[in-house]
Image (tube, grey):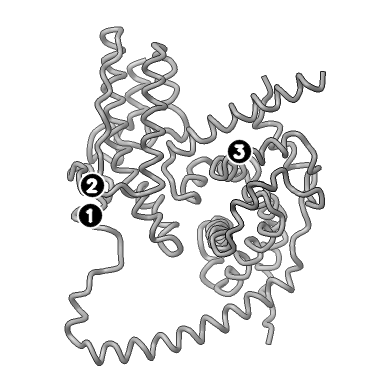
Amino acid sequence: MIDVETEIRSLAQQRLPEPTPVQAIVARGSGLRARRRAVFTVAVLAAACLVATVGVAASSTPSAGWPTPDDPIFDGLPRTVVVEVLANPRAQDDVRILTPVAPGARNSMWQGMVINFVQCRQLLVVYRTWSVTGRPGVLAPHPVPGYPQEPSYRDVQVIDRFYRAAIASGDKARLRSDLLNESGCGVWVPATPGDAGGATIADVVRSLG
Amino acid sequence: MVGVAPRDFVAWYAAEAPRMLLTLRAALGDDGAAHDAADEGFARAYARWDRVSRMESPTGWVYVVALNHARSAFRRHGRERANAARYPVAESVPGPEPMDPVWQALHTLAPRARMAVALRYVADLPEADVARLMGVTRGTVATTLHRARADLATRLSVEEEQVR
């Protein structure tokens, strides 16, 4: 079997392309900076006019920050998990990098992570049952949001099929490997709801053997 | 007037730009788009270098900007479909040998799988960073890479058989 990972890595080491000369980047960046300053000046003037016109009413405008548990993107999802995910430092860290440049992707990611938490804990139940009884537990359907956000919701379905295939294979080691995988849900979803610093699902899976 | 680049920007650019360009070329399958996206990302970094240089990962920030710029450009010009039809990449593309079977196979993957493979194996970013850059969950990256590796291995094995 061909080791694709090694092949691509070695290919990437062979010869790197020649980038644009740095002087051209600096010129382009300076142009952007000048345009940004001009836009900023106009925006400040416009904002001043707006504040003067709208006055106190402007204070009731919703914040442009992160979503709250009442945001429609969480409709249909368990509120306790929503609250937990919004407060989870690693979830916040994952979303933070998207906030300035991709606000649409941010909502999709929050929703995906909430479903991911639920899904992962259900998988732990399946694995635990398998370890104790010798037969896998039944994987409950993942929660369905009222307003599915893409691309996360499509991903949720792909991941769901992925794990169901692992369970259907009858190979407990396969599910174990998926839950211990470096980027699987197991390595970061807390086994105990709300205990962000405690044992992860992967920790529990390891202890079950 | 063009300003003088702070020295650390120049050094950082020299260190990061070649791999960034190769990664974007692998991810986007288009040398022109890769150059444009990389240039835009680095130019924006220069424009706000006082802030970007203090970030934990300026390179990660440039990846996000560059990939968003590429997506906007594809949408604007309606080029995504045209690019898909143009795979494998043109022979004039620099970097690894364009006719290399691995490189060619990479460009048969779906855009998102290609992007995950490029960020993980060409840029050599950890899977968690790939997830952040693509705006997806870590599990999605794992499954995407798992499938992409299987697809590539199958395709390359078939080609190897045909050569024999």
Whether tag 2 and tag 1 are in contact, CB under 8 A, the answer is yes
Pointer 2 chain: A
Can residue A36 be seen at all in this image of the molecule?
A: yes
x and y percentages locating residue B153 in the rendered image: 65, 26
Structural distance between the alpha carbons of marks 2 and 3:
32 Å
Q: State which quarter of the image contains the N terminus of chain B.
A: bottom right
The residue that mark 3 highlights is B109
Q: Is mark 3 on a helix, strand or loop?
A: loop
Quadrant of the image occupied by residue A184: top left
The relative height of residue A174 versus residue A75 in the rendered view (above or below) is above
Circle 2 packing at 10 Å, graded few (<14), some (14-19), many (20+), is few
Name the mark on residue A146: 2
x and y percentages locating residue B133 in the rendered image: 50, 51
The relative height of residue A81 versus residue B3 in the rendered view (above or below) is above
Question: Viewer-proximal residue, B6 or A184?
Answer: A184
Quadrant of the image occupied by residue A141: top left
x and y percentages locating residue A126 in the rendered image: 28, 20
Q: Do marks 2 and 1 share a chain?
A: yes
* Amino acid on which disc 1 is placed: Pro
* Amino acid on which disc 3 is placed: Leu
Structural distance between the alpha carbons of marks 2 and 1:
8 Å
Pointer 3 chain: B
Name the mark on residue A72: 1
The relative height of residue A180 versus residue B119 in the rendered view (above or below) is above
Horizontal side, residue B45 vs residue A183: left or right: right
x and y percentages locating residue A153 in the rendered image: 36, 42
